Amino acid sequence: MKFNKPLAWAASLCLYILNLPAVNAQKVVKYDLYVKDTLVNFTGKSKRAIAINGQIPMPTLTFTEGDTAEIVVHNLLNEPTALHWHGLILPNKEDGVPYLTQMPIKPGEAYTYRFPIKQNGTHWYHSHYGLQEQIGMYGSMILNKRGDDSTFRKGIDDLPTIPLILSEWTDMKPETVHRLLHNASDWFAIRKGATQSYVEAIKQKQLGTKLKNEWKRMMAMDVSDVYYDKFLMNGYAESSFKNLKAGDRVRLRISNGGASTYFWLRYAGGKITVVASDGNDVEPVEVDRMMIAVSETYDVIVTIPAAGTAFEFMATSEDRIRSASMFLGDGVKQLIAPLPRLNYFAGMNMMNSMMKMNGDLDDMGMNMSLNQMDMNAVMYPEITGAVSKETSTTDLYSPNKVSSIKTLNYAMLQASSNTTLPAQAPAKEYKFTLTGNMNRYVWSIDNRVISETEKIPVKKGETLRLVLYNNSMMRHPMHLHGHDFRILNGKGKYAPLKNVIDVMPMETDTLEFRANNEGDWFFHCHILYHMMSGMGRIFSYTDAEPNPLFPSPEKAYQKLKADDRMAHFMARNDFATNGNDGEAMLQNTRYSLATEWRLGYNDMHGYEIETHFGRYIGKMQWLMPFIGFDHRYRDMGDEGPEKNLFGQINTKNKRTQFSFGAAYTLPMLLIAQAEVYHDGNVRVQLMREDIPVAKRMRADFMINTDKEYMAGLSYIVTRNMGLKTHYDSDMGWGIGLSLNY
Amino acid sequence: MYYFFLRYSVVGVAFVFAAFLLWLPSMSSAQNKLSTDTVSISGLSEASKPVMQKAISMHSGAQLNWSGGQGKAQLVYDGRKTSRSTLLKSIALAGFDNSDYLAPDEAYQNLPAALRYERVRKAKWAIITNPLIKTPQAVILTGTTNNLEGAPLDKVIDFYLKMKDALVSTDSKAASKAGAEMLSSIKAVKVNNMPVNMANDWNNNRQQLESAVQNLTKEVNTDAQRQLFMSLSPIMLKIAKAAGYQEPLYYQFCPMANNGKGANWISQFAEIKNPYYGSMMLNCGQTVETIK
């Protein structure tokens, strides 16, 4: 990162702070934050990012419990913004969620957040506006304990600390990332080498696995959605912290500020001792490695075991494509081995056995919870390498049972003090099923996105118990604003307090919290692109004082709902020797407006435009009824009109027809489509697009009762360009250049 | 049909052109200005060189030159495309410790036995007990044998190592002084607290050891001290094996010492620091035995 080296360096020097007892805790601590567009260069190309006070990540904000925070945000961007203080328990109007707790801060405006610091621990802050979090708007927020705090822990709270914020960078605009995800682009998979094509399947003797996977209507699976160019720790892919000597113990205050990346954390100098999570103290627990979910924080202690050596602390993205490192200590650098690549076909095989034909997941009676079982472990060579033939399948999913590598899970966390809630309070239980549709990138709770639901009413003083079941194929880090919840993990009175819980596929986790903080609070998946797709709910305290920041709360709420109503556009055209051939599509959670065209170069080939407007039905969205309009023209000379398979006279030569029909996704991802035109003509069609033949090779075909057929083969060169050859019953054989947006 | 072919040829030409444009960047390479860095790498041998070369060759054709010297090699690379740091990291990830990076344990363990080498640094890691984690206390046996008195021969070894370090830095005065201290520690050893085996080994070698050390302390010239140290070290090996020293010890060998006949010494470090040549041949030698 070239633009801000001196600043960042100065900042990293400041990072080394001792937790000294606050002399005068009752004070106002003020920060001025200047939010500004900037250019960064992480990869060799200059790209737009957003910096605060010239820095990415944003400056570390430090307070002591008992302080009053006063943070002035100066918006120097050309777009609105808002900052959310992640994990903080504060008045609702300071929470920083645009259109829910405040109006966005307009360009040119300065806005003051002011709230008392009523807790301690490692937290962070980020933009909650649009996709700004992806391009630099995240930073550490450290709340120190007071020296006279009764919970002050000798050997922990008096250690030197280093705030560490993890993040990721892509040269692609986040809006483009979002659009590609919604258009089922496999460009990210190509970049990751995770296409899982038929040729690769055959090479690895996994053809049966691949066929079964497509039979169950699944596209290639992966543990994460987005390909990133760089992973960063405090803004650097690699950095050093030299001011440590042999025998020193240091506390790392780690926040995962990544928009969609889970990280494996490992240390070359021995074990990692976990002492807090999401800003709440836990009893020290020693592990070899741990996963930090998107938006979680962990405090860990590591030791420098030898002199003259710097030990690598590494954060590897869950997909294991890249990592970021900090070397602790001074001298020759002791490396840690990179994590071996994932065995995708083993994962595919596992998914096949868990996926029912109706798209539900089947945990086969394993009662999974609290990350103790990790189905993905079948893809980890470092775990499966230790597995003997006698290991039962169930044990295979429990990495701590089969391997000597000890991995942290939620069942190992125990609060340092009693966390029980008042027993006499009325309790209310909500069951939420986390749902999703990978193929169309729809993410929801109980199959409803935010805009399709109303706020959930909450009475102050009651106890809320949430039972979360993940019936989707991806893991979701669920985050609650304004409260800490207890994770019921078998530790009884000492259930750990957190504000983020990662729920893996098929897991059921139970949380509870006391409703003691009035206002409207967001509860959502913290994967940025899942949240923007509508995966969340809002808890709203009844009889709360109205938020003074809204002239019209209802209008504001409509604006919030607009996030997941947004339609995503894609277009493609094949400039081929036998004509132009293309489509354009506008889609959102439920609706699709799509136009296909074929434009010939002469009258005999003619032209044809078909438009469909449909609504996806059901959880898996396999069924889509639609209405359509078809316009075509061609001059076949002497040849008369053809008949279709049903004996009806075909209007292929000159047609301007309305239609209605339905499309249905069959096993093997075949799309069957039946359509009736307003003159009574019927057309039934079967097609399949994007068959992953090889890593960059795709095939498609179509056949219908108008005796039309088409087959094509394309090679993906870049994200926007491919080479395509196809044969079309009307237009003949052609070869061309395919461009897409 | 005519139109078809016309179009086809136009599109075809466009294709070839596009392919050419895509290919072009890989062709453009100006005359390289190569950097050469001398680096130290552990485990260099005829057998390991190709493994290291393979590890770095993905970085724009970097070359590893090694002419058989001890632990030193040259990296030749294009500084605009890669860096010394990148190359040495790759070599470490392949399993070879070097001046900038230490290999991950897994990488070292994955090396075929023939390519393994004595790891210098790893031996010096402190075993740190985590004060935050309560582990069951080790059971301390209380019996008639005075185990807590501990290792009665450790002091003798300590002074031997001190003498060795003095010879490494060619300091004859310090060597004599360590010799004198060693002598008095030999005299202070009490056999009655020792286990039987240890006492036997000690009694069998004590005489020889004492006279060798005595001779050494009388010498003021380092060369003469080194000559005597050569005969002292094999005796010390037997003592060290009997002693059960608190830390691992390394019995090391330099084939060039003693006019090409070779000579041994004991060191507390796996890393070679030759006591027979001082700074001239400091790193000559290898570990032949580890005493634990």
Image: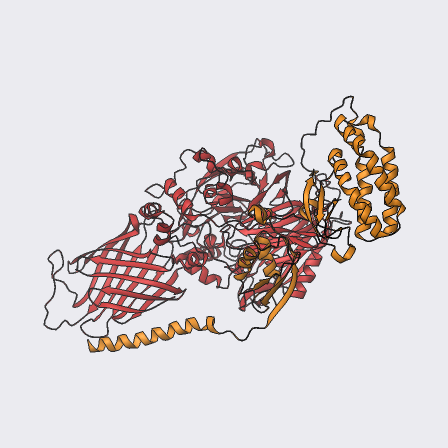
Q: Nearer the viewer, residue B63 or A164?
A: B63
Q: Is residue A584 visible?
A: yes
Q: Is residue A103 visible?
A: no
Q: Nearer the viewer, residue B172 or B144?
A: B172
Q: Position of residue A681 (x, y in %)?
A: 15, 58
Left or right: B287 in relation to A100: right
Q: Give the quadrant of the C terminus of chain A.
A: bottom left
The residue positioned 18% from the left and 66% from the top of the image is A655
Residue B39 lies in quadrant: bottom right
Q: Position of residue A443 (x, y in %)?
A: 42, 50
Compared with A584, A141 (above or below) is above
Left or right: A102 in relation to A308: left
Residue reaching furthest to the top:
B144
Q: How many marks?
A: 0
Q: Position of residue A215 (x, y in %)?
A: 31, 46
Chain coloured red: which letter? Answer: A
Q: Position of residue A589 (x, y in %)?
A: 38, 54
Chain coloured orange: which letter? Answer: B
Q: How is the image coloured?
A: by chain
Q: Nearer the viewer, residue A3 or B192?
A: B192
Q: Give the quadrant of the N terminus of chain A.
A: bottom right
